[in-house]
Amino acid sequence: VVLEGDVTGGIIPYKNPSALFAYYLGVFSVIPFFPIGVTGFILGIVGLKNYKRNPVVSGRVHAWIGIIVGGFFGLIWTAATLLIIIGIVAQA
């Protein structure tokens, strides 16, 4: 009898790639490039919906990190980019 087990102990949500990518994009959204955070935020929402539909896939915490951190830095970098553009246009 072969039992399928989760080798990672549920730490890495490989069955929920949206949550996993949201986590990494959320962490890397510290880098000032706003689409990274926005994408992490969106994938976090998708990953959380996947988790709510099927809790076996795990990834709830990863999805939340993508939503919170990605959303926060996505908002900051988007606002900073808009302020830079407004400053450049005002100079012209």
Image: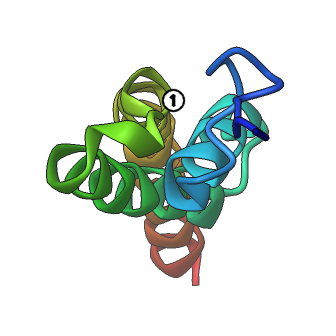
Is residue 84 at least partly visible in the picture?
no
The kind of residue tagged 1 is His
Residue 48 x %, y %: 28, 46
Question: Is label 1 in a helix, a strand or a loop?
Answer: helix
Say few, some or many: other residues with alpha carbon within 10 Å of mark 1 (under 14 / 14 to 19 / 20 or more).
many
Q: Can residue 91 be seen in this view?
A: yes
Residue at far front of view: 1
Q: How is the image coloured?
A: rainbow
Q: Where is residue 51 in the image (x, y as percent from the top left)?
A: 29, 45
Left or right of 33 in this view: 43: left
Report whether 79 appears left or right of 91: left
Where is residue 87 drawn, in percent x and y? 51, 62
Q: Which of 48 and 27 is in front in this view?
A: 48
- For disc 1, the marked residue is 62
Q: Residue at x 32, y 62 (%)?
A: 46
The quadrant of the image that shows the C terminus is bottom right
Q: Say above or below: 90 vs 68.
A: below
For image coordinates 71% across by 56% down, the residue present is 33
Horizontal arrangement in the rendering, residue 63 relative to residue 39 (left or right): left
